[in-house]
Amino acid sequence: MKPAAFDFLRPDSLEEALEALARFGADARVIAGGQSLVPMLNMRLARPAVLIDIMRLDALRSIREEGAEIVVGAGVRQAALEAWPQLAEKLPLLAKVIGWVGHVQTRARGTVCGSIAHADPSAELPLSLMALGGWVRLRGKRKARSVPASDFFVGMMTTAIAEGEMIEAVSFPLAASGTGFAFREIGRRHGDFAIVACVAVADAAGTRLAIAGVDDQPRCFAVPTGDGDALDDALNDIAWSLNARDDLHASARYRRELVRRLGRETITEARAACRS
């Protein structure tokens, strides 16, 4: 199929892009890498009247450190983050995750913020942002606001972006000393969306487990201290609290079992890294 007809704008500044968003409202969509949006256009699952291309806006293409955060602009491609020399030091979890995001070809075009905006419940970047307690910086013509990841993802491919707003950047907290990270994913093939993916983050205050691929959005849980039966019981409770469903790729039962198994593996690894 081919997309329905639309107008195409390529603004010369962020202000011009925001002006267009304010003018066209719900009829406009922002496009950056287009790895998610273009297939939706071709299948006519999305039918905007206007596409606003932001990829040539230099103001949105930086990776920078601000205080205790790494801020990734809306024009930063996934491959650029993967190649960032300080990734393993500043964001060790993302260094583990980024190679699992799609394929080399899609990472060369797709953007970090585009994946966050698309909000696929199986995607690795929304999962990582949720696990780390990151923020999404939204910008409209009249105001800017920051939304925590825990409030940004509100349902299946549904976010807190309001009409006339766009993602300007996302921010990931810098890795603190003494924090351990772990990531596991099961998919049909490497580069496919996850059937289940788990991230564990452990420090002296405790452990949290984030899960993608099971519910309508990434979910994050505090995990009680301890191992053995106590951890198994906690993981079983988490697995049953998720809205798992059968589909063409896996059964709900299989997904819950992956939560138990991958959850234990990631928690064990993150706790070991925290102590080392």
Image (cartoon, rainbow, N blue to C red):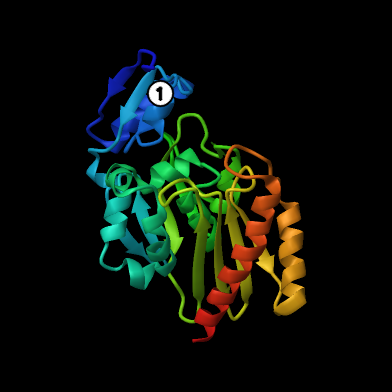
Residue at horizontal 27%, vertical 62%?
A: 84
Quarter holding residue 167: top left
Q: Residue furthest bottom?
A: 276
**Image quarter hosting the N terminus:** top left
Closer-to-camera residue (67/276):
276
Q: Secondary structure at mark 1?
A: helix
Which residue occupies the extreme top position in the image? 5
Q: Is residue 207 left or right of residue 33?
A: right
Residue shown at 73%/70% (left/top)? Answer: 232
95 relative position to 237: left or right: left
Mark yes or no: residue 191 visible: yes
| Residue type at the position of mark 1 | Leu
Expressed as whole percent of the image width and height from the top left, the position of residue 207 reads 62, 72
Q: Which residue is mark 1?
A: 41
Name the residue at 59% across, 76% down.
Answer: 268
Q: Residue at x 32, y 43 (%)?
A: 106
Q: Position of residue 78 (x, y in %)?
A: 33, 50
